[in-house]
Image (cartoon, grey):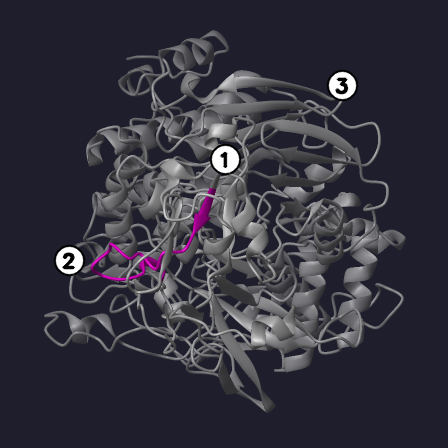
């Protein structure tokens, strides 16, 4: 898995600064504004960025979609170009009304933990994948970056 | 069903005795009782009558989130517990706030709060997942330290669960035991850990996959950018060469690493200092732990906090140009004073704090003390401001010459502190058992005249260059120790401020200055400073502070962002953004008054609170001089109490609210019940 990740060509993506630049405060603002702006709710299934806070260490690691250039999640989608789409900037995004909740994109994600969230529900029609789209329709750019109180998130130079 | 914003709609009644759960709709209480402590006060009034003791199964632990919890509104991650507190002296109804991610997770699991009643037959923990509540055996958790318990629960249920747990102190009914989240946030002021222990309740572990829906998302985002002016700038790990209270830091050989982290889910500040790679009390492995305020004196307590003046940035009396919340002070993001402030020179009159000489600076020992408190689940205030200074002062005064702890009393010694806290937490021997009963009770058992009131001769004021009296026991009122009260610790505030903080304390059942640090405007200060006990402005500011504290624990919000004296409807905006229910500042203040009245009614009905009782409880500590040699006279104090009761609408003779006051805030039923038991003042 590690080798596979290391050799990947990545698109521009949200990155966490090293602690000597800025130390994540663990406030989860990135998760919160992500789900608020995409879905109008706050909840663990609705975030597209993930804060892993050390229980004893209180050191937090932020996981985000790496926007792989070969986008295996997009390729795995049985409804590609309807549910999982690719825009002119190479950003893979989801049109949820077409997502059937098959979870193949989550399984196709090469990263551990997977960077695609998934709404689990007894109601099959509510099962949806949730993936970072870099707030592609938001003029201010990714909300997680804008609302990070310690500016420890930024866009990578790659892509 | 109408969409509910802010709240998630259910309160779970959890009976540990028969392992049953029932559901109460949150709408039974809201919006009239807002959320958090307001709801808890109402439930407690309805369900727990007089005669119930802290460790009785009939005592109830009420845990409540607020409508802002989990919405993304800053500070909403704080939540509140209430119960009859074993740490209050005498035992009384009290509350304790807590941060962390736990509260938001409770809402994601579908609950606005819990009423925990009864007593489990054997060690138990609650596992709550998406509306389902299980009673699981805690036999394999019992005896574990706080972080080991947190880790074990994650091992069992997965890394994404959030837990509040007790350590050995709570299990052994140590009266100042705390309840702790995974990020060293504690509910410590009401002895809640011991109430958990008395119910054989080791932990509550939650996983939720649901959602919280705020009513007004643009407003939530606006509040995130506006509340307390978040820095929105990088905060790297800093290598520090010194440590201590700003202005009196001491060098640390080899230095140490500091980061800043947020206390609770979704806050927009980072007031907690995360100390990295610190010495542990329990092994060779280095640990990280947080330092907020009182932890700082664990590392050295030779002198008190310096006096900054009556006002100025961060001061008690504030101007529009120069005020900032406490979180800025703790994250060290204070801007230089604004020179356009017309009162600036009057506000800032710095001076050194009292010399106390309790213990020398020892960085590793300080870390060990904090680690012991964190892992055992003990209230640090009681340990750092009461127990250890008592031993330091008492030893110098020869009070303990005939006492044998089994090890020589030496608060400078890391080994002694470890021995002492182990003895207390595990109730070893006569003195371990005695001190586990809390300082107020232990000192009375030993004999208060000698073991509490003996004068320490090592206090020296650098404000007036004179030795001043200080009792070896820094007790204020209700079984709690001093906190911003003009003597002891954080004593460097002048009389116009400390008469207010003592008035806050008088009407409470626990230390108040964690949730209602006193604030007023500098213009008021100029009016009241010459005779603060005879100024209605002092009482008015205390009432404002008390009401804001009710709101902080109800919405919820935080003492370090609220009140903002120059944005007075901030809390109303928070409530409306979360719930969509229109709310004016006045309406919200009325809700706070209602909550405060319920608290008052509980302590009158259940604990016999009267004016005589509370005036006597607080008056003694104010007879020791402040750093300027000032005290308060009986007449002054009673004049202030008169002004306060009058403004509150309480009877001046008894201290009991009048029927008119209860009815004004929609509490006729409370007035009726109090009248039936003779605890409503007679109408004239």
Q: Is residue B79 left or right of residue B441?
A: left
The answer to whether mark 2 and mark 3 are in CB contact below 8 A is no
Chain hosting mark 1: A
Tell me residue B377's x, y (percent). 69, 53
Q: Secondary structure at mark 3?
A: loop
Q: Residue at x 46, y 66 (%)?
A: A70
The dominant secondary structure in magenta is loop
Q: Name the subunit of mark 3.
A: B
The residue mark sitting in front, 1 or 3, is 1
Query: Residue B683 appears at what percent x and percent y?
Result: 31, 12
Query: What's the magenta region?
Result: A129-144
Q: Is residue B604 left or right of residue B16?
A: left
Q: Quadrant of residue A41?
A: top left
Q: CA distance from mark 1 to mark 2?
A: 59 Å
The residue under label 1 is A127
Quarter occupied by residue B522:
bottom left
Q: Position of residue B31 (x, y in %)?
A: 34, 24
Q: Are marks 1 and 2 on the same chain?
A: no
Dot 3, crowdedness within 10 Å: few (<14), some or many (≥20)? few
Disc 1 and disc 3: Cα gap in Å?
A: 37 Å
Q: Is residue B361 above or below residue B82?
A: below
Task: Mark 1 and mark 2 in contact? Answer it, CB < 8 Å.
Answer: no
Residue A84 within the segment the image draws in magenta: no
The answer as to whether the residues below labels 1 and 3 share one chain is no
Which mark is in front, 1 or 2? 1
* B213 vs A139: above or below: above
Q: Residue at x 51, y 79 (%)?
A: B244
| In front of the other: B136 or B571 | B136
Q: Which residue is mark 3?
A: B18
Of residue A124 and residue B248, the one placed in the foreground of this image is A124
Q: Earlier in the sequence, mark 2 or mark 3?
A: 3
Q: Which mark is residue B523?
A: 2
């Amino acid at each position: 898995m590690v080798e596979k990740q290391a050799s990947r060509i990545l698109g521009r993506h949200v990155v966490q600064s090293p602690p000597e630049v800025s130390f994540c405060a663990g406030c989860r603002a990135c998760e919160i504004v992500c789900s608020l702006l995409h879905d109008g709710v706050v909840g663990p299934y609705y975030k597209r960025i993930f804060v892993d806070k050390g229980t004893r260490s209180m050191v937090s690691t932020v996981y985000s979609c790496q926007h792989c250039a070969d986008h295996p999640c997009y390729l795995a989608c049985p409804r590609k170009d309807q549910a999982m789409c690719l825009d002119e900037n190479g950003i893979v995004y989801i049109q949820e009304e077409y997502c059937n909740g098959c979870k193949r994109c989550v399984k196709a994600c090469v990263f551990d933990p997977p960077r695609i969230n998934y709404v689990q529900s007894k109601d099959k029609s509510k099962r949806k994948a949730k993936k970072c789209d870099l707030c592609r329709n938001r003029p201010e750019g990714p909300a997680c970056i804008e609302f990070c109180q310690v500016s420890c998130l930024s866009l990578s130079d790659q892509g | 069903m109408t969409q509910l914003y802010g709240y998630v709609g259910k309160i779970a009644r959890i009976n540990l005795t028969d392992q049953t759960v029932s559901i109460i709709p949150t709408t039974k209480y809201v919006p009239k009782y807002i959320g958090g402590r307001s709801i808890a006060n109402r439930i407690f009034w309805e369900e727990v009558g007089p005669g119930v003791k802290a460790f009785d199964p009939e005592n109830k632990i009420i845990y409540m989130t607020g409508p802002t919890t989990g919405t993304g509104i800053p500070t909403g991650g704080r939540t509140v517990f209430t119960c009859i507190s074993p740490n209050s002296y005498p035992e009384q109804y009290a509350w304790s706030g807590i941060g962390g991610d736990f509260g938001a997770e409770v809402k994601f699991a579908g609950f606005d709060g819990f009423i925990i009643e009864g007593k489990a037959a054997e060690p138990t923990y609650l596992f709550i997942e998406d509306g389902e509540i299980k009673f699981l055996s805690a036999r394999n958790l019992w005896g574990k330290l706080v972080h080991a318990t947190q880790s074990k629960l994650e091992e069992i249920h997965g890394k994404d669960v959030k837990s509040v747990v007790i350590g050995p102190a709570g299990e052994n009914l140590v009266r100042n035991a705390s309840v702790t989240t995974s990020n060293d946030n504690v509910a410590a002021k009401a002895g809640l850990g011991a109430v958990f222990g008395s119910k054989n309740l080791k932990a509550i572990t939650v996983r939720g996959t649901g959602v919280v829906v705020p009513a007004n998302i643009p407003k939530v985002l606006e509040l995130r950018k506006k509340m307390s002016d978040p820095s929105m700038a990088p905060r790297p790990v800093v290598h520090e060469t010194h440590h201590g209270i700003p202005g009196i830091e001491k060098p640390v050989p080899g230095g140490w690493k500091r980061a800043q982290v947020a206390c609770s889910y979704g806050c927009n500040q980072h007031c907690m200092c995360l100390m990295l790679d610190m010495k542990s009390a329990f092994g060779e492995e280095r640990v990280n732990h947080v330092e907020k305020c009182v932890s700082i004196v664990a590392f050295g307590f030779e002198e008190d906090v310096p006096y900054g003046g009556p006002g100025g940035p961060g001061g008690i009396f504030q101007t529009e140009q120069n005020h900032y919340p406490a979180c800025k002070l703790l994250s060290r993001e204070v801007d230089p004073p604004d020179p356009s402030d017309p009162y600036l020179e009057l506000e800032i009159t710095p001076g050194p704090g009292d010399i106390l000489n309790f213990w020398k600076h020892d960085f590793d020992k300080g870390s060990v003390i904090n680690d012991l408190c964190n892992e055992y689940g003990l209230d640090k205030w009681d340990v750092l401001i009461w127990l250890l200074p008592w031993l330091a002062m008492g030893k110098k005064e020869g009070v303990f010459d005939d006492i044998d702890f089994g090890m020589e009393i030496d608060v400078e010694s890391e080994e002694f502190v470890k021995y002492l806290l182990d003895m207390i937490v595990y109730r070893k021997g006569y003195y371990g058992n005695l001190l586990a009963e809390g300082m107020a009770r232990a000192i009375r058992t030993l004999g208060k005249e000698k073991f509490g009131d003996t004068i320490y001769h090592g206090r020296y004021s650098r404000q007036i260059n004179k030795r001043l009296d200080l009792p070896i026991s820094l007790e204020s009122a209700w079984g709690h120790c001093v906190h911003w009260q003009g003597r002891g610790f954080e004593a460097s505030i002048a009389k116009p401020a400390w008469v207010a903080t003592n008035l806050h304390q008088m009407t409470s059942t626990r230390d108040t200055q964690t949730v209602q640090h006193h604030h007023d405007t500098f213009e008021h200060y100029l009016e009241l400073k010459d005779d603060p006990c005879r100024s209605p402005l002092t009482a008015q500011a205390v009432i404002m502070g008390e009401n804001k504290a009710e709101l902080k624990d109800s919405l919820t919000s935080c003492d370090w962002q609220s009140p903002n004296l120059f944005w007075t409807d901030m809390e109303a905006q928070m409530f409306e953004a979360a719930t969509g229910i229109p709310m004016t500042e006045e309406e919200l203040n009325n809700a706070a008054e209602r909550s405060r009245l319920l608290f008052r009614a509980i302590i009158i009905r259940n604990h016999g609170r009267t004016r005589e009782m509370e005036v006597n409880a607080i008056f003694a500590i104010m007879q020791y001089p402040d750093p300027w040699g000032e005290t308060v006279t009986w007449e002054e104090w009673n004049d202030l109490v008169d002004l306060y009761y009058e403004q509150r609408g309480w009877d001046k003779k008894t201290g009991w609210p009048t029927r008119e006051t209860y009815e004004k805030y929609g509490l006729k039923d409370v007035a009726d019940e109090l009248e039936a038991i003779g605890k409503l003042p007679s109408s004239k």
